[in-house]
Image (spheres, grey):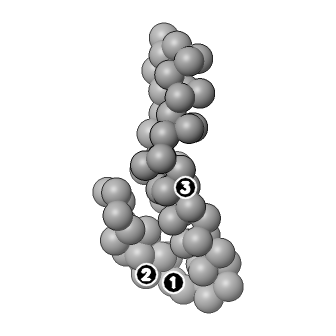
Amino acid sequence: MILNTLPEPNADTPWEEILNFGQDPAARAALARLRKWTATIAKDSPSPGVGEDELTALPGGH
């Protein structure tokens, strides 16, 4: 579920772009939301459909 929604760089993407992405405030905020969601899912153990719905409901979710 998560692996299908995470962006993946192309083979020809420069390393500088990848490193800059990691410093981008929006990307860092999205990572913080993903970490919070992961902690909640691990604690609450909802059904897969509920977990996926919650993930897609996050800002920036697909």
- Looking at the rendered structure, the secondary structure element under dot 1 is loop
Camera sees residue 11: no
**Residue designated by label 2:** 50
Tell me the number on the disc at residue 47. 1
Mark 1 closeness class: few <14, some 14–19, many ≥20 residues within 10 Å? few
Mark 3 closeness class: few <14, some 14–19, many ≥20 residues within 10 Å? few
Q: Is residue 30 left or right of residue 19?
A: left
**Which badge, 3 or 1, is on the more N-terminal residue?**
3
Q: Residue at x 34, y 71 (%)?
A: 57
Question: Which label sits in the foreground, 3 or 2?
Answer: 3
Q: Residue at x 49, y 56 (%)?
A: 29
Do callouts 2 and 1 mark residues in contact (Cβ within 8 Å)? yes
Camera sees residue 20: yes
Tell me the quarter of the picture where residue 58 sits: bottom left
Q: Is residue 58 above or below residue 8?
A: below
Q: Residue at x 48, y 76 (%)?
A: 51
Question: Which label sits in the foreground, 3 or 1?
Answer: 3
Mark 2 closeness class: few <14, some 14–19, many ≥20 residues within 10 Å? few
Do callouts 3 and 2 mark residues in contact (Cβ within 8 Å)? no
Q: Quadrant of the C terminus?
A: bottom left
Report how far apart the C-alphas of labels 2 and 1 lie in the structure: 5 Å
Tell me the quarter of the picture where residue 19 sits: top right
- Give amino acid for label 2: Val
- Give amino acid for label 3: Leu
- Looking at the rendered structure, the secondary structure element under dot 3 is helix
Q: Nearer the viewer, residue 24 or 18?
A: 24
Q: Is residue 52 above or below residue 6?
A: below
**Residue designated by label 3:** 31
Residue 22 in the image, given as x and y percentages of width and height: 57, 37
- Give amino acid for label 1: Ser
